[in-house]
Image (cartoon, rainbow, N blue to C red):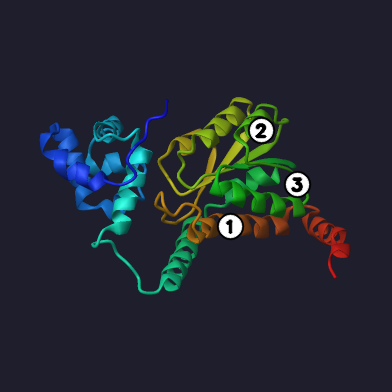
């Protein structure tokens, strides 16, 4: 039997019960109440560090409040923030989205400066790639597969966790896994990274989170900058950060991989008859 969890009411539950909590949980509750708009964008690790408590305390508080875990609590908190009169709003939604996208591009570009070389070395030393992403990151994984295929790589793209796990467990020697996860805490992505690593495959992660289970399971990490709440998953700002990483890698590899420019030309010729 499934157990339903509240989809709103995180703030009211915190306000009602925080006075009766242990000192550590009370400090955590007060931290969340003071800055709910920031907490909805944080991982469990970031929240625990900000409130100066252990990660186990975060999980315990969520469950004490009637939620199955941190993600369910954060979903309810995001819904509370969205309907709160104190929530920041914009009279022009298009402007708000545009500003978020521009900020993601600028901040991601700054984070990539001088940090691409290890990833380029790994990609330059292989001919076979497995690309995996779940959910919204799975959509972006298709873009990664398309661009790397045009460079002449042998590419497998999976968005199904079982197929990705099987592929990761049987990768040929010298292959590279490219994994995409904004949060860094998607369980299926972590599993695929761990399976590839156990086989001796080099792993490259594209994520927003510096401290996450996925980061710990990856050999190389490229960071993106974006802000997503549980209610805005797959936002253009998040995708733009991932796609900027892709285009940066593509542009560099096009200039240094033997035969890359010929492969791009050949793939273009292969589909010319599909255009009117």
The circle drawn on residue 163 is 2
Q: Position of residue 36 (x, y in %)?
A: 26, 51
First-in-chain label (2 vs 3):
3
Which circle's residue, 2 or 1, is located before the other in the chain?
Answer: 2
116 or 167, which lies in front? 167
Task: Please state if 180 lies on the left or on the right of 166 as rendered.
Answer: left
Identify the residue shown where x is 74% and y is 52%.
257
Residue 118: percent from left, percent from top: 58, 46
Describe the element under mark 1 as helix, strand or loop. Answer: helix
Residue drawn at 67 percent across, 56 percent down: 250
Pointer 3 residue: 153
The mark nearer the N terminus, 3 or 1, is 3
Locate residue 153, reporting x and y percent.
75, 46
Residue on which disc 1 sits: 243
Question: How far, Cα to Cα, is label 2 from label 3?
Answer: 20 Å
Residue found at x 26% / y 44%: 10
């Amino acid at each position: 039997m499934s157990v339903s969890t509240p989809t709103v009411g995180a703030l009211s539950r915190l306000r009602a019960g925080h006075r009766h909590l242990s000192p550590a949980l009370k400090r955590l509750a007060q931290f969340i109440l003071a800055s709910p708009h920031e907490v909805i964008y944080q991982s469990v690790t970031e929240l625990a560090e900000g409130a100066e408590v252990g990660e186990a305390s975060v999980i315990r508080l969520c469950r004490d409040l009637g939620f199955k875990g941190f993600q369910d609590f954060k979903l309810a908190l995001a819904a509370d923030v969205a309907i709160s009169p104190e929530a920041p709003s914009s009279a022009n939604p298009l402007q708000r989205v545009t500003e978020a996208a521009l900020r993601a591009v600028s901040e991601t570009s700054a984070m990539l400066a001088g940090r691409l070389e290890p990833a380029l070395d790994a990609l330059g030393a292989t001919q076979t790639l497995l690309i995996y992403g779940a959910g919204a990151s799975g959509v972006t994984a298709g873009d990664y597969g398309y661009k790397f295929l045009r460079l002449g790589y042998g590419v497998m793209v999976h968005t199904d966790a079982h197929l990705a796990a099987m592929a990761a467990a049987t990768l040929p020697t010298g292959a590279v896994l490219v994994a995409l996860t904004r949060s860094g805490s998607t369980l299926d992505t972590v599993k695929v990274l761990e399976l590839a690593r156990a086989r001796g495959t080099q792993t490259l992660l594209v994520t927003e989170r510096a401290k996450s289970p996925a980061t710990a399971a990856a050999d190389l990490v490229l960071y993106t900058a974006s802000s997503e709440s549980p209610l805005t998953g797959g936002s253009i700002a998040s995708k733009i950060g991932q796609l900027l990483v892709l285009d940066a890698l593509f542009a560099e590899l096009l200039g240094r991989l033997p035969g890359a420019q010929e492969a791009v030309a050949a793939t273009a010729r292969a589909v010319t008859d599909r255009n009117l």
